[in-house]
Amino acid sequence: MKVLNKETDYAVRALISLGMKSDGWVSAKVISGEQAIPYQFLRRILQELIRNGLVESKEGAGGGVRLAKEPGLIAVAEVIEIFQGKVQLSECMFRKQLCSNRANCVLRHEIMRIEKMVNQEFSEVTIGKLIADLKAVEAMKG
Amino acid sequence: MKVLNKETDYAVRALISLGMKSDGWVSAKVISGEQAIPYQFLRRILQELIRNGLVESKEGAGGGVRLAKEPGLIAVAEVIEIFQGKVQLSECMFRKQLCSNRANCVLRHEIMRIEKMVNQEFSEVTIGKLIADLKAVEAMKG
DNA sequence: ATTAACTGATACTAAATTGGTATCAGAAAT
DNA sequence: ATTTCTGATACCAATTTAGTATCAGTTAAT
């Protein structure tokens, strides 16, 4: 049961990289190097983050990307939703009709409850929080 | 972000079917009909449940399968683990060595925490509980 | 004006996973 | 002997995942 795929994983790491730089534009190349993310793959991921308003970009030499909002306002839940879709609602609820299979229905009810919890948790984990954790770890190691 | 795949879904439904029958052996054919699960697919799923000790079988005419333990003792978490693997531990913890990528590491730490929660929740949802829920729903509808 | 360093857009690929099908062998009940 | 069942396993198409490649256009610096 894999929770996060590579896209989400790389996206979060890229956002952390960006969040740790207070200055201007950072190129995909630099992030790719820092986080050991395949360059072309990262390019595509960044474009998706841009389309979704988490990141903004500047074309041309000296250009690159930067966060479009404060790290504390970017939740991992948003990133998951972009790359892996919303944590799935059960089909029977979605269709707003009685579930044809009741066994299925009670299972989905439980799943929905748990999914809601997961969503809640992931929306409390922000890039800002991850960066703070990271800095705490670094500090501890001297 | 899909939580359960078809195998897990079908397995749980099959287990519910079995748990609701107090009498003897039930054939895959019957379960397949009851739960609208493709027969050959279900066969494979049942064999996996047998190998993992959740279900036991009797060969030959009049044979079939039945639960190997009480419905209240079969957790959905077990079923998920059989078909989708254990909710993934982060690689860096698994290797018991320092994470080469620290950004990755703080992210995984959060994931692990949430994964643990999910596991806890799914281990509290048993087939017995689902059957009770199901019966409650049926009763309400008269 | 040219060149180098960038992003935008998009097409392509190999490998793995998912969901499902088919087949053959053997066991038990009738 | 025949029917009803499981055991084991091989196969398959479609989708997803992870990654690569290419070309066009933008900007900054020389």
Image: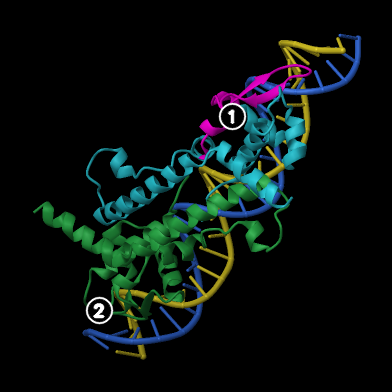
Chain colours: A green, B cyan, C yellow, D blue
In the image, is residue A131 above or below residue A141? below
Residue type at numbered disc 2: Gly
Residue A30 seen anywhere in this rendered image of the structure = no
- Determine which quarter of the picture holds residue B46: top right
Residue type at numbered disc 1: Leu
Residue that mark 2 sits on: A24
Q: Are marks 1 and 2 in contact (CB under 8 Å)?
A: no
Query: Are the numbered discs 1 and 2 placed on the same chain, yes or no?
Result: no
Span of residues in magenta: B49-76
Quick check: B117 left or right of D10? Answer: left
Question: Residue A23 versus residue A69: which sits nearer the camera?
Answer: A69
Looking at the image, which residue is at 66% across and 57% down?
A: A92
**Separation of residues labelled 1 and 2 (CA atoms):** 56 Å
Is residue B117 inside the magenta stretch? no
| The disc label shown at residue B49, or none | 1
In the image, is residue B17 above or below residue B66? below
What secondary structure is marked by label 2? loop
Residue A27 rendering spot, x and y as whole percentages? 31, 71
Looking at the image, which residue is at 54% across and 33% down?
A: B72
Output the chain of dot 1.
B
- Determine which quarter of the picture holds residue B30: top right
Question: Residue A88 versus residue A58: which sits nearer the camera?
Answer: A88
Question: Residue B4 versus residue B73: which sits nearer the camera?
Answer: B73
Output the chain of dot 2.
A
Quarter of the image where the C terminus of chain A is located = bottom left
